[in-house]
Image (tube, helix red, strand yellow):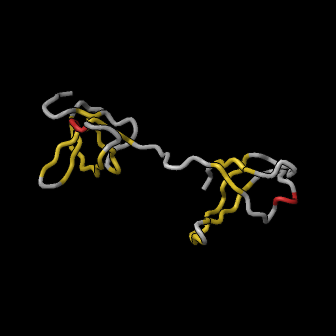
Amino acid sequence: MGQVAELATDSDAKGPTRATITQVYPAVSAGKVSVDLSAPGISGNLIGRRLALRLALGQRQALVIPSRFVITRSGVDYARLAESDGSVDEVPIEAAPGPAAGEVEVLSGLADGDVLVGPGERR
């Protein structure tokens, strides 16, 4: 929800060409998904109609780090964080394969802006 979609309308239908998805209904019928859209200024003849949409799929933000920053012990992944007082703490993380070789996606345990310290490195 909140994603911007491009409306593919008939050339005679007047109204916005962009809309924001406000609700996605979980049922799929005949390979189609129903959604509600917000499109200020939409022409009345488009309300309640089935429309084709164009939208980007498979895009999301991710926290990706080099795999050399991940330490695995007893099946648990850890990352070493540099603290503001100069100390280094190990925090457990949940990692998944990254988009490229030598990278991992961090699903939990780290936040944008954390400063990582590699194994054997000192801050």
Q: Is residue 42 left or right of residue 79?
A: right
How far across and how far down the image is residue 92, in percent? 24, 50
How far across and how far down the image is residue 81, in percent? 26, 38
How far across and how far down the image is residue 59, in percent? 50, 45
Where does the C terminus fall, quadrant-wise?
A: top left
Q: Is residue 62 left or right of residue 50?
A: left
Q: Is residue 121 left or right of residue 32?
A: left
Which residue corresponds to the image point at 70% horizontal and 55% vertical from the top-left? 52
Where does the N terminus fall, quadrant-wise?
A: bottom right
Who is closer to the viewer here, 31 or 35?
A: 31
Who is closer to the viewer here, 46 or 85?
A: 46
| Figure quadrant of residue 21 | bottom right
Which residue corresponds to the image point at 66% horizontal and 58% vertical from the top-left? 22
Who is closer to the viewer here, 122 or 46?
A: 46
Q: Is residue 105 left or right of residue 119?
A: right
Who is closer to the viewer here, 38 or 35?
A: 35
Looking at the rendered structure, the number of numbered marks drawn on it comes to 0
Which residue corresponds to the image point at 23% horizontal and 42% vertical from the top-left? 79
How far across and how far down the image is residue 74, in percent? 12, 54
Which residue corresponds to the image point at 78% horizontal and 63% vertical from the top-left? 49
